[in-house]
Image (cartoon, rainbow, N blue to C red):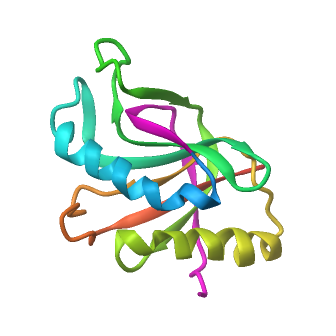
Amino acid sequence: MKIAEPRFENGKAMLIAGLGGHFTDATLAKISTLWQRFESRHLGHVPRQVGKAMYGVCHDFEPGNVFDYIAGVEVASLAGLPAEFAQLRIAPRRYAVFAHAGRASEIGNSWRAIFGEWLPNSGHQFVGDPCYERYDKDFDPKTGLGEMEIWVSLKK
């Protein structure tokens, strides 16, 4: 898959809260189950949610494509959230932002193209800090269609 050239953004500080898990190549398919649980139990009911966008945040990377992932939303405060929620503070960073065309279930193809093709040939370096999928307010979780972006943190 060929990925379109990104735009570059200075990302803001954010607090993200939602359901989290630890994933490897062997368990990547379970991320969709995490999203289904979040959408059915919590979407639209998260205390102090900021905006309507949803975020799939990859963080705490380990060698061998092992990482933690949160299916969640931006919140104004971490206080009073459900006990089962994972929480993450994202610091301001420089990002390469890639549009994902297609269904949400195919977003892994975009990730592979970014890290397998674009990044090694771009002259940029991945910071390793959290990077994320952003599902805009027009994204429909039922169809898996709508505006989706992948934000990859870069060294300046």
Q: Depth check: 57 or 151 in front?
A: 57
Query: Residue 17, position in %: x, y?
Result: 39, 31
* Residue 28 percent across, percent down from the top left: 53, 59
- Residue 120 percent across, percent down from the top left: 81, 71
Q: Nearer the viewer, residue 104 or 91?
A: 104
* Above/below status of 62 relative to 50: below
Q: Report the span colored magenta.
A: 1-22
Q: Residue at x 44, y 49 (%)?
A: 56
**Picture quadrant where residue 1 is located:** bottom right
Majority SS type along the magenta span: strand
Q: Is residue 107 above or below residue 76?
A: below
Against 3, is 152 above or below? above
Q: Identify which residue is drawn at 36% across, 40% down.
A: 72
- The residue at 51%/32% (across/down) is 13
Q: Residue furthest front?
A: 26
The residue sitting at the bottom extreme is: 1
In the image, is 60 to the left or to the right of 70? right
How many numbered marks have been drawn onto this rendered protein structure? 0
Q: Is residue 90 left or right of residue 135?
A: right
* Residue at x 75% of width, y 47% of height: 127
Nearer-the-camera pick, 5 or 20:
20
Q: Quadrant of residue 65?
A: bottom right
Q: Is residue 117 left or right of residue 23?
A: right
Quadrant in which residue 16 is drawn: top left
Residue 22 on image: x %, y % = 56, 41
Residue 43 included in the magenta stretch of the image: no
Asked whether 9 falls inside the magenta stretch, the response is yes
